Amino acid sequence: MLQRLENKYLSNPTKYTNLYSMVQEEIEAKTAKGSSSCTNGLLWLTRAMDFLVALFRNLLEHQDWAMSQACSDSYSKTLKKWHGWIASSSFSMAMKLAPDRKKFMDVICGTGDINSDIEKFCTTFSPLLEENHKVLASVGMDELKAS
């Protein structure tokens, strides 16, 4: 997804000053719904980031939850409705390999106040994701399911 968006940007940085210019071009060319389109890449990148925001919120709000529970709840709220049976089953299997919550938090912690950093990330990033959803909805792409 990211490579697709980056390659498109690098093909003409002056023309593609933002992601939405790529989306508009693909909408006009009627190529936006293609599985290898930048619009589709932006859609799934936005959904993946929705999952991460939901996961971080769960980690903040439910200190007693295991990592697998936080991930499963986040998945149910964000990605599950867009996935078919195979992807959903794969996610369930992957949850059996989820890291221990403490190990995960230690890895992402760094040197700052992890709870404050997570809250700042969620607060700052959520409006950007909402803007992506609005743009994708305005061109009929926000409800596209996996093919």
Image: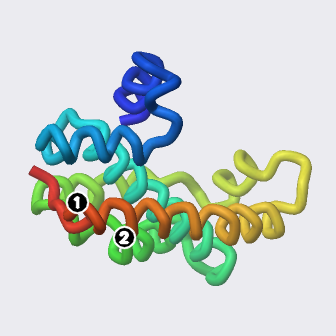
Colour mapping used in the image: rainbow
Q: How many marks?
A: 2
Label 1 element class: loop
Task: Give residue 56's position: percent from left, percent from top.
Answer: 61, 67
Q: Is residue 141 left or right of residue 63?
A: left
Residue at left offset 29%, top offset 67% = 137
Instruction: Residue type at mark 1: give it.
Output: Met
Task: Give residue 20's position: percent from left, percent from top.
Answer: 41, 47
Q: Is residue 133 or residue 115 the one in the foreground?
A: 133
Task: Give residue 102's position: percent from left, percent from top.
Answer: 69, 59
Q: If you read the primary sequence from the N terminus, does the residue marked by circle 2 or circle 1 appear first?
A: 2
Instruction: Residue type at mark 2: give it.
Output: Thr
Residue at left offset 45%, top offset 28% = 15
Task: Give residue 124's position: percent from left, percent from top.
Answer: 69, 65
Looking at the picture, does residue 81 appear above or below residue 32?
below
Residue at left offset 71%, top offset 49% = 108
Residue at left offset 67%, top offset 52% = 103
Q: Nearer the viewer, mark 2 or mark 1?
A: 1
Looking at the picture, does residue 23 appear above or below residue 123?
above
- On residue 18, which mark appears? none
Q: Is residue 55 or residue 140 the one in the foreground?
A: 140
- On residue 141, which mark appears? 1
Label 2 element class: helix
Q: Are marks 2 and 1 in contact (CB under 8 Å)?
A: no
Q: Is residue 23 left or right of residue 68?
A: left
Image-quadrant location for residue 23: top left
Image-quadrant location for residue 120: bottom right
Circle 1 residues within 10 Å: few <14, some 14–19, many ≥20: some
Circle 2 residues within 10 Å: few <14, some 14–19, many ≥20: some
- On residue 78, which mark appears? 2
Looking at the picture, does residue 50 appear above or below residue 19?
below
Q: Is residue 131 or residue 143 the one in the foreground?
A: 131
